Amino acid sequence: MQDLAGFRVVGVLSFADQDRLAAEIARRFPADPREPRIRDRRAEPSYGYRAVHVIVSLDDVTIEVQVRTLGQHMWADLMERLADRLGRQIRYGDAPAPQAGRSPEAAQIIVGAMMSLSETCELACGHAELPNGLQPPDWREHRPGVPCWSRPGGDPGAIHPRAAAPWQPRH
């Protein structure tokens, strides 16, 4: 880690919004002494981690600004919590080290599921191409209880099989 300061911006953002926000942050920090840089971790994910990082400097202090969608943030937060229990090394692709008495196989399945979830989150946000003409949801217009995934025209009868019903908490 090379930054001495940092902060995170998290919001209900499309990828286009995320790009615009990162560009605006970079624009507001003149070269002091280095030019601002944007690192797109969506294009180059690191073991499932995705975000856009803006690296700027102010009075010769390097500052990293992480710009995340809500989905990217929730994934990263959950991964940090898992790393607290399964070992910090899982964030860098190494095998989990579960606590004594816990199954290493189960821990590996959980970490594998997190990597798959990272891909699914990007798909849900519209970054990757969806199969069979499905359209990504606009989360700003989503209503609870209404399926998110649909074909053009909003036909709720044509739901992606892995997103059939919204999740509901158990009572």
Image (cartoon, grey):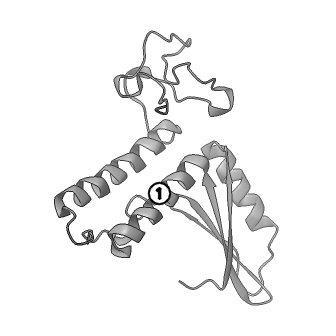
Whether residue 83 sits left or right of residue 103 in the image: it is right
Q: Residue at x 46, y 32 (%)?
A: 170
The 10 Å Cα crowd at callout 1, few under 14, some 14 to 19, many 20 or more, is few
Q: Secondary structure at mark 1?
A: helix
Q: Could one spot residue 139 in this view of the protein?
A: yes
Residue with the mark numbered 1: 78
Image vertical order of residue 55 relative to residue 130, above or below: below
Of 129 and 112, the residue lying toward us: 112
Residue 28, horizontal then vertical, whole percent: 82, 68
Of 128 and 96, the residue lying toward us: 96
Residue 56, horizontal then vertical, whole percent: 70, 76
Mark 1 is on which residue type?
Leu
Residue 120, horizontal then vertical, whole percent: 41, 41
Q: Residue at x 43, y 60 (%)?
A: 79
Q: Could one spot residue 45 in this view of the protein?
A: no
Whether residue 135 sits left or right of residue 10 in the image: it is left
How many tags in the picture?
Answer: 1
Whether residue 21 sits left or right of residue 81 in the image: it is right
